[in-house]
Amino acid sequence: MKHSALLAASFAAFSTFAAAPALGATTQWSSATANGNGCPIGTSSVTIAGDEIAWVFDEFYFDLVQPESASRFCRLSARAKIAAGWYLARLDQVLSYAGVKSTWGSSLKVAAVSRFFGFTLPVIQHNYPNGTAFNSAYSELQGQQYFSVFAPPSYWCSGSNPIGLFQSTLSATGQVLPGGGSLSFVGQGFNVKFSAVAGYLACQP
C-alpha cells in the first residue's frame, strides 16, 4: 500500500507601501533537506518553483491495531535568500490531511512546529478525542503570525540580501489501547499538506 504525504511551504510577497516584486523575485531557495522516520532516505522529494518550496513523502502514515502505538516525524530545512529591500511581515501556516479513521480506544495527535529567520512560529496541532471513535474525511489546522508589529531588524533593510533558514517539524502520534480496535492515519489515496505563506513589506528610505 502506497501512501503519499505532501508538505509544502509557499511564500508569496506583497507590500502595503510599494508594488510587490514579480513571482520568484523575493525568495531564493537552496539546500533543502528532509530527515526523520516519516521521510526515510529515498522516500521524499523536493520541488522549488519561484517563491514556493514543496516536500513530497511516501512514508508519512501508519495503520494500527490494538494494543499498538506509533509516531512519525520529519524535520525540514531550507536556506532562504530574500530580495534586498524587503522584510518579513507575516507568515500563515496551514496543515491539512485526509484519510484518518479509528474505532473505540484510539487517540491521535498531529502537529507542525516551525521557525523562519529565527522567529518561532505558533504551534499548530490537533488532538483527537482519547478513547472515542472518529472518522475524518478532511481536516485543516491553521496558525498565523504577524511580524509587522515589530520593528524590522536592521540586517533586513541594510541594502543586502538577508539569508536565513526555514525549519519545520511535522509529527503524528497515534495509539490504540488494549481492548480497542484500530487507527489509520492517512489512508491509501490521501495525503498530508503543510503550507506556509509569507508576506513582505518594503523597507522604508
Image (cartoon, rainbow, N blue to C red):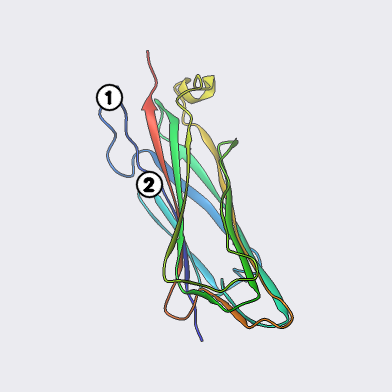
Residue depicted at 48% across the width and 29% down the height: 147
Q: Position of residue 62 (x, y in %)?
A: 60, 76
Residue 54 falls in image quadrant? bottom left
Is residue 41 placed above or below 87 in the rendered structure? below
Residue under numbered circle 2: 51
Q: In the displayed structure, does residue 68 sit left or right of residue 193?
A: right
Is residue 198 placed above or below 190 in the rendered structure? above
Q: Position of residue 115 (x, y in %)?
A: 58, 42
SS class of the residue under badge 2?
loop
Question: Which quarter of the rendering shows the C terminus?
Answer: top left
Tag 1: amino acid: Ala
Residue under numbered circle 1: 18
Residue depicted at 29% across the width and 22% down the height: 17
Q: Position of residue 67 (x, y in %)?
A: 73, 81
Between the C-alphas of marks 1 and 2, the distance is 18 Å
Badge 2: residue crowd in 10 Å (few <14, some 14–19, many ≥20): many
SS class of the residue under badge 1?
loop
Cβ–Cβ below 8 Å for labels 1 and 2? Answer: no
Tag 2: amino acid: Asp
Towards the viewer: 24 or 170: 170
Q: Position of residue 193 (x, y in %)?
A: 45, 61
Towards the viewer: 203 or 67: 67
Towards the viewer: 53 or 123: 123
